[in-house]
Image: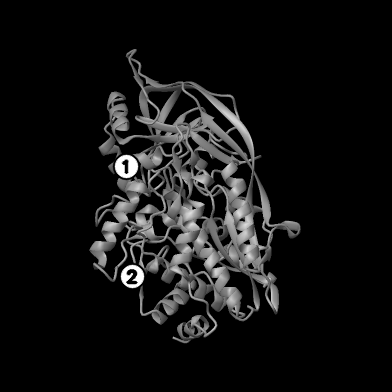
Amino acid sequence: MILLAAAAAAVAPTASDAPISPDRLSDSVRVLASDAFEGRAPGSAGEAQTIDWLIARFKALGLEPGGPNGSWTQPVPLVRTELGEGRAAVAFGSGTAMPLVQGRDLYVSTVQPVAQVRIPDAPMVFVGYGVSAPERGWDDFKGVDLKGKVAVFLVNDPDFEAAAGEPVAGRFGGRRMTYYGRWTYKFEEAARRGAVAALIVHDTAGAGYGWETVTAPRGENFDIAGSTGRVPLQGWLSGEAAATLFARAGQDLPALRRQARRADFRPVALGDARFSTDLPVRTSRIESRNFLARLPGSERPDEVVMYGAHWDAYGRAADGTIRPGANDDALGVAGLLEIARAFKAAPAPRRSVVFGVWTAEERGLLGSEAYAARPVYPAAKTVANITLDILQTAGPARDVMLVGQGQNELEQDLAAAARVQGRTVTPEALPERGLFYRADHFSLAKRGVPTLLFMAISGAPDLVQGGRPAGDAWLKSYMVCYHQACDAWRADWDLRGAAADVTLAYQVGRGLAISARWPRWNAGSEFQAVRRESQAAR
């Protein structure tokens, strides 16, 4: 109770707080998501326009450059790869073959800067969920050698489909995805074990999104230049193609799904199936940039409260189609501008406030990862990171969605701020989407920085007009446009709810910026230990 009271006092509004304007949010998105910015792809003309626009806007608000050596930006060298048309197929001992059509049967890419991905007749091994978690008493690999082989995974965690009473039920948090359930973890594990390819069997429920989202990058991929330990080919098998492949290999995929929910599961060779590819790769190097702005603290300038969003979207496709990323994440960037405006209108914070606007989030959180690996402001002295990535556009809501319930004390700050607005906090309704591991705050969380994520696709809001059913209708309509060309600015957006959420983000961050408090990870969080290691620096 004492902690909650302190949090409430810290986030209570003051007379000098500037209002967050729905109209200004809309105006910023209308510009960033316009055709002139070409979808804001890293390395494009749209990036140059975006960075120039950010510098002008934050400079006009009175902030100073927050990047290295007094600059507005931090270089992020990227390698861009794009698969060309080629051959992918699975051959069987009977002499028959199963062609795999990119975009229909499978979706693959590479992040290795090579001219060709050529895999000749590689054996295929089903590794269940592909989880190695000694702290949970779980190992799907059982020492099986994957060198030179294709690892085939299920998406999500071993308990995702478990029924009540199964021994695995709840072992990985139930419907709440852990990092073991993320496709990034599975690709990393395949690379660690020497596989030549990693393929994940897609299902919409387990992935949290449909096949159209999987194929959205259209063979293009990015990585931070100089990265090592990557699997040569990574991607997904459609559910239909996987069912056919397993059957032709003499295996029953539904039965194997059930077996994979047991701790004694062992990898299963897919008979005499041999996977082959011969795919050309176009490779280029891109010099992209993170943007950083700073409001210096009056008393503790070396202690930093950080806000984040990502400026990038998917750019212009070969056919000229632009995916403008209006909500994902131009609206989050607009929110950062409004928060900066609010801070400038209020008394100076004791701690510094930094705004990080990251590149290449859509390519795997690369900009924020590059920053976190070489931070301008040490993680040990970063008080918290508050990230805006997709806000709801359907009007005022009675609640705000909480992503990653149970992680750290910032949840209590959020609840206190929401009470000031007469609102409540609702835990994410779709924890199986693993959103806590899918936004830029995660790059900082891995380094021990307590984080708070605002991401509206985590559940249907309880809208003032229409309640949860209306919120569900909004969510379903937005997911149709997620990563698609129709994620575009609309004049009929009602951004009052988004403005209220941005206000919450401001209030939580301001409470930290005017205090000396260091929020903590909760006992049991996977990030508590790394934060504890840096305690002496605080």
**Left or right: where does residue 86 sit relative to residue 342?**
left
Residue 91 to residue 470: above or below: above
Sort mark 1 into few (<14), some (14-19) or many (20+) by Cα contacts within 10 Å: some
Q: Where does residue 469 sit, x and y in percent of width and height?
A: 23, 62
Q: For this rendering, which residue is in front, 62 or 245? A: 62
Look at the numbered disc 1 and give the secondary structure of its residue.
Answer: loop
Nearer to us of marks 2 and 1 is 2
SS at mark 2 in the image: loop
Label 1, on which residue?
A: 203
| Circle 2 Cα neighbour tier, 10 Å, few/some/many (<14 / 14–19 / ≥20) | many
39 relative position to 356: left or right? left
Q: Position of 305 compared to 124: left or right?
A: right
Q: Earlier in the sequence, mark 2 or mark 1?
A: 1
Q: Determine if residue 519 is in view.
A: no
In terms of image quadrants, where is residue 341? bottom right
Q: Nearer the viewer, residue 479 or 372?
A: 479
* Residue at the (55%, 35%) spot, across then down: 111
Image quadrant assignment for residue 171: bottom left
Disc 2 residue type?
Answer: Ala
Q: Which residue is identified by label 2?
A: 397
